[in-house]
Image (cartoon, helix red, strand yellow):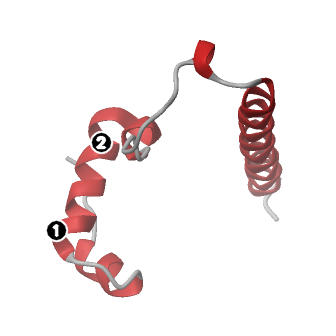
Amino acid sequence: MKQYNNDRTAAKYSCSYSQVYSWVRKYDRQGTDGLNDNRGHHKAEEDLTDNEKLEREIKRLKEELRRKEIEVKFLKKLSELGRGR
């Protein structure tokens, strides 16, 4: 298993050691999908109004854009490190 400093992370984010430990275990097992909060009621796609469907699509696209922006920043940084900057 990877080495983590859960004590420092818990102090930094003002949460308990056990909460950080739980997050780390979920991440190790399922990656970022394991960190999703799946609590709450979710309507089936066919039960949504047109407006709700559009809101879901906007939210999905914003999240996709955010991930792409992070990926671009990561690749730029990786390229800089490869050139020895």
Q: Position of residue 51 (x, y in %)?
A: 80, 32
The reply, left or right, for residue 9 in relation to residue 58 is left
Image mark count: 2
- Residue 82 vs 60, above or below: the answer is below
Q: What residue sits right under mark 2 in the picture?
A: 28
Q: Amino acid at mark 2?
A: Asp
Please name the residue shown 40% across and 44% down the image: 40
Res. 30 image quadrant: top left
Q: Nearer the viewer, residue 30 or 48?
A: 48
- Residue 13 vs 74, above or below: the answer is below
Q: Secondary structure at mark 1?
A: helix
- Residue 22 vs 13, above or below: the answer is above
- Residue 41 vs 2, above or below: the answer is above
Q: Quadrant of the C terminus?
A: bottom right
The reply, left or right, for residue 69 in relation to residue 36 is right
Q: Nearer the viewer, residue 77 or 66?
A: 66
Q: Position of residue 84 (x, y in %)?
A: 78, 60
Real-space CA distance between mark 2 and mark 1, rounded to the nearest whole angstrom: 15 Å
Mark 1, residues whose alpha carbon is within 10 Å: few (<14), some, or many (≥20)? few
Residue 2 visible to an observer of this rendering = no
Please name the residue shown 16% across and 68% down the image: 18
Res. 6 image quadrant: bottom left
Residue 79 marker: none
Res. 80 image quadrant: bottom right
Q: What residue sits right under mark 1 in the picture?
A: 18
Q: Amino acid at mark 1?
A: Ser
Q: Position of residue 56 (x, y in %)?
A: 71, 33
